[in-house]
Amino acid sequence: MKRIIIESLTYPRMMMLSHMDAERCPLHLRFDPGYEKCRGCERLRECQWLADHNEFQALSEKPVQYLYDAMLFCIDFVESRSTLDGHNVGRCACEDCSWIRDARYLSHQVGEQLASLDAPVAPHPISC
Ligand SMILES: [Zn+2]
C-alpha cells in the first residue's frame, strides 16, 4: 500500500516543481522555515511540502497516516489548479484530472484502512 501511495505522489511533486521558479527564489527552493522570505512567499505551502516529501527522503519508513495526509494535500493542490483552469474533474481525460480520480480512489481505500485500524476491537465473548 505504501509503495502505491509513494508512487502516486510523484505526479503532483513534478507538477509542483514545474510551477516553482527556482531562478526567482533566493534559496533556490531549499525551504527554510526560519527565513523571513520563505514565510512570506506565495509558494510557501508547496515549497514546504516538497521539502518535507522530497524523493530522497525515506518515505517508505513514514507511517501510512503521514503518506495519507501527503496525498490529501496533493489532491487538494492538483484539484485547485484543475478547477482554476476550468476542468471537469469527473469527466475530463487530461493527465491532471485522471490523476485526481485515481488519487481520490486510492485515498478512499487508504482512509478506510486507517479507520479500521482505529476502530475499537470488539471484546471477546466470555465462554463458560
Ligand atoms: Zn482535466
Image (spheres, rainbow, N blue to C red):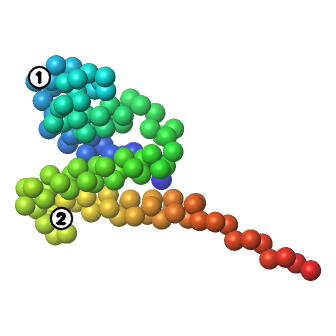
Q: Which residue is drawn at 74% across and 71% down?
A: 123
Q: Tell me, yes or no, if residue 123 can be seen here.
A: yes
Q: In this view, does 15 lie above or below 87?
A: above
Mark 1 element type: loop
Q: Which residue is drawn at 69% across and 71% down?
A: 122
Q: Residue furthest bottom?
A: 128
Q: Tell me, yes or no, if residue 3 can be seen here.
A: no
**Whole-percent x and y of residue 29?**
22, 26
Mark 2 element type: loop
**Whole-percent x and y of residue 31?**
28, 26
Three-letter amino acid code of the residue under disc 1: Glu
Residue 89 marker: 2
Q: Residues within 10 Å of mark 1 (few under 14, many from 20)?
A: few
Q: Which quadrant of the rendered structure holds the C terminus?
A: bottom right
Q: Which residue is drawn at 14% across and 52% down?
A: 81
Q: In this view, does 46 lie above or below 126?
A: above
Distance in Å between CA atoms under marks 1 and 2: 32 Å
Q: In this view, does 4 lie to the left or right of 95?
A: right
**Whole-percent x and y of residue 36?**
23, 23
Mark 2 C-beta closer than 8 Å to ligand 1: yes
Residue 23 marker: 1
The quarter of the displayed image where residue 85 is located: bottom left
